[in-house]
Every structure is written in C-alpha cells, then in structure tokens.
Image (spheres, grey):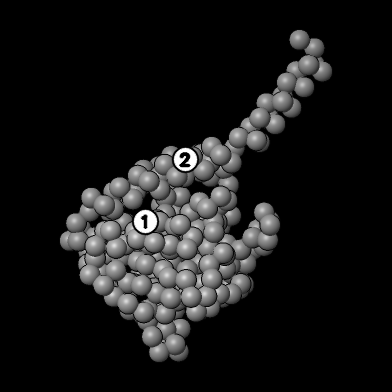
Amino acid sequence: MNKKKIFGLIIIIIGIIFIFITPIMKFFINNKVDNTLNDFEELKVEEIENNNEEKADFDFENISEISPSKVLLNPGEINKNLIVGQIVIPSLDLNLTIFKGLSENELFAGVGTMKNNQIMGKGNYAIAGHYAENNTLFGDLTSIKIGDIVKITDKNNIYEYEIYDTKVVDPNQIDLIEDTESEKRGNPIISLMNCYYEGKKFTGNRFFAFGDLVSVKEYREEEMIRK
C-alpha cells in the first residue's frame, strides 16, 4: 500500500472517530449516571448520613471543560461512600446523584457539593456539575427558567427550591456559594453551577442558577421523580 493510500485511510479513520466520539462519550457517562442512581436507591438513610461525614475533595479546578479523553481514559470506580443525595429538575428532565465534594471521577457520574458540611434545606446548598452536550450531566442547566422547581433529597426529606435568578460570572466569583448569599436573601437557597458555553465554545465563565427553598416534604421515591 503506497503512502497516499495509507494517508487516506488514516484520514478516514480519524473522521469516523470524530463522528462517533461524542455518542461514545455520552454512552459512558450515562452508564455511570444510571449505575450511581441505582446505588443511591439502595442506600439507607443512615448510610447517607455517614457518607456526609466522609472526607472529600473540594478542588474547583475539577469543574473544567469536559473532553472525550478525560471520560474515556478515566475508568476509575465511583466512590459510593461519597453519595449524599439526589437532584431532580423536572423541567430539564434531569435526574442525577449528588456526591460530596468535587472529585473528577464522581463528576463524570453526577454532581458535587461545593463546600464541606453543607446541609440540605439550610444556608446556601451549592452544587456544581459538568457541562456536556445532549442533556448529559448539567449540560442543559443554562436552559433553566425563573420559576422552575429543583428537588433534592437525602432520603429523609424532599427539599423543593424555586429558581429566582440566573447569571453568568467570572470563574473567580466564588463568593456566590457562601451562606452569606442565603442570609442576604433571608431564606435558605440552592446554587447550581456549571461551565458556561456559547454555542460549543467554552467561555471560561461560570453559569449560576439560584433558588429559594419553598417546600420540605417527607421523602417518597415516587414524589421525588414525579414531573
């Protein structure tokens, strides 16, 4: 086979990889998401409470641009001891596991808490996740609207928040996750964050959505996933 044919074959292979890499990445992520949601379903309240006492990584650098290489070359096991809850946003058809901390491996399977010792329904419960295309992970977060409901649970209660504001900010504006924001609001709040894209280009900024706590109900699985 001459060099021209070899070069042409290489170009074809690269083209095929380029076409299928995003669906393959989505498959790997969704598989992890489904598995961790199953893990959450099996956990007892006491186990979740114990998980909240685990040590965790809160490195904001892990909330960065996601890439196929990061996903496909990161086959590490999910740490089930970091599972602390579940988040559902009915308007976005979003259902994810909440992990304690911002470990990169866990962020490929769900979302993570941004501060240590966060308590659902109190202060500013801050959660971060990766942007990924096609309604994967926190990919559709920027589509959230004022008035949308966000549900989180620790299997004790279901905490419902109503979105009251969204904004795009500089990545260094981390004060938005502090409890002082809920004190200013005069109400417990939730802060949801992901990387901000314009089209398919990462801007380097962060997108935030904020919600007021409007309801606390006893946990029932069917109520949690009800749209």
Q: Identify which residue is drawn at 65% across, 35% down.
A: 19
At mark 1, the secondary structure is strand
Residue at 63% x, 32% y: name it. Answer: 17
Could you say which quadrant of the image residue 4 lies in? top right
Specify the farthest residue to the right.
4
Where residue 213 appears, as percent x and y from the top left, is 37, 78
Give whichever of 183, 227 is nearer the camera: 227
Q: Please state, as top left, top right, bottom left or bottom right, where the N terminus lies in the image.
A: top right
Where is residue 85 shown, x and y percent of the image?
A: 31, 61
The residue where tag 1 is placed is 97
Q: Is residue 109 left or right of residue 198?
A: left
Is 9 displayed left or right of 24 in the figure?
right
Identify residue type, mark 2. Answer: Phe
Task: Measuring from the top left, give residue 40's x and y in whole percent.
Answer: 28, 53
Badge 2 element = helix
Residue 53 visible to the viewer: no
Q: Kindly identify which residue carries mark 2.
A: 28
Instruction: Name the one closer to the observer, 105 or 15.
Output: 15
Instruction: Give the class, few, some or many, for how many residues have Cα within 10 Å of label 1's Cα (few <14, many ≥20).
Output: many
- The single residue placed furthest to the top in the displayed view is 1
Residue ID at (64%, 63%): 204
Q: Which residue is more in the foreground, 131 or 140? A: 140
Residue type at the position of mark 1: Thr
